[in-house]
Image: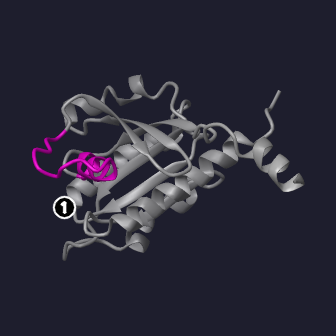
Amino acid sequence: MDYLCFRALCCKGPPPPRPEYDLVCIGLTGSGKTSLLSQLCSESPENIVSTTGFSIKAVPFQNAILNVKELGGADNIRKYWSRYYQGSQGVIFVLESAFSEDDLKTARNELHPALQHPQLCTLPFLILANHQDKPAARSVQEIKKYFELEPLARGKRWILKPCSLDDMEAVKDSFSLLINLLEERDFEPSRM
């Protein structure tokens, strides 16, 4: 009888709502931002077009919903990225790990100011080294060294993970790690 009482108290009603987090997703054109987000939303890979301005996707996970504002990565759009940072709770930076040396340098020159931007510098960062399935892809260690992540991101919460569309489980695992960082941030005491 006591079991039925307890079950009636704790198991009635809808499940608790999942927390929602607002994220900004940046990276150069061709890095795979749109493709990765579309796959995470179970959208058809056909008809994917590079983002020219920005788009917003609600990416559902079991324990959270990520509202991802994807910003186009074209040269004429990147200068406006910072206008869209406000209200972000985390950052996703996607880079093409098989970029040419020049494009990799451009990606580094975009990531560094983002890591140091006043509206982003305290937020968790997920850096995805995409297209690891390509022969020319650089390893995570090479990217970490080239992007000078250890000294630049010291004291920040960041994750660098390899990924490709061929291994969406690894992509989902990377996003789960980001969700963990976002949840930890929710439980940090406020600073006065």
Q: Mark 1: which amino acid?
A: Ser
Quadrant including the N terminus? bottom right
Point 56% across, 49% down: residue = 63
Quadrant including the C terminus? top right
Between residue 65 and residue 83, name the one nearer to us: 65
Point 24% across, 30% down: residue = 77
Between residue 122 and residue 184, name the one nearer to us: 184
How dense is the environment of label 1, judged by Cα within 10 Å: few (below 14), some, or many (20 and up)? few
Q: At which x and y percent is residue 36?
A: 29, 53
> Which residue is outermost to the front?
1
Residue range corresponding to the magenta coloring: 31-50
Q: Quadrant of residue 95?
A: bottom left
Q: Quadrant of residue 55?
A: top left
Point 26% across, 63% down: residue = 165
Q: Quadrant of residue 190?
A: top right
Q: Which residue is mark 1?
A: 100
Q: Is residue 173 magenta?
A: no
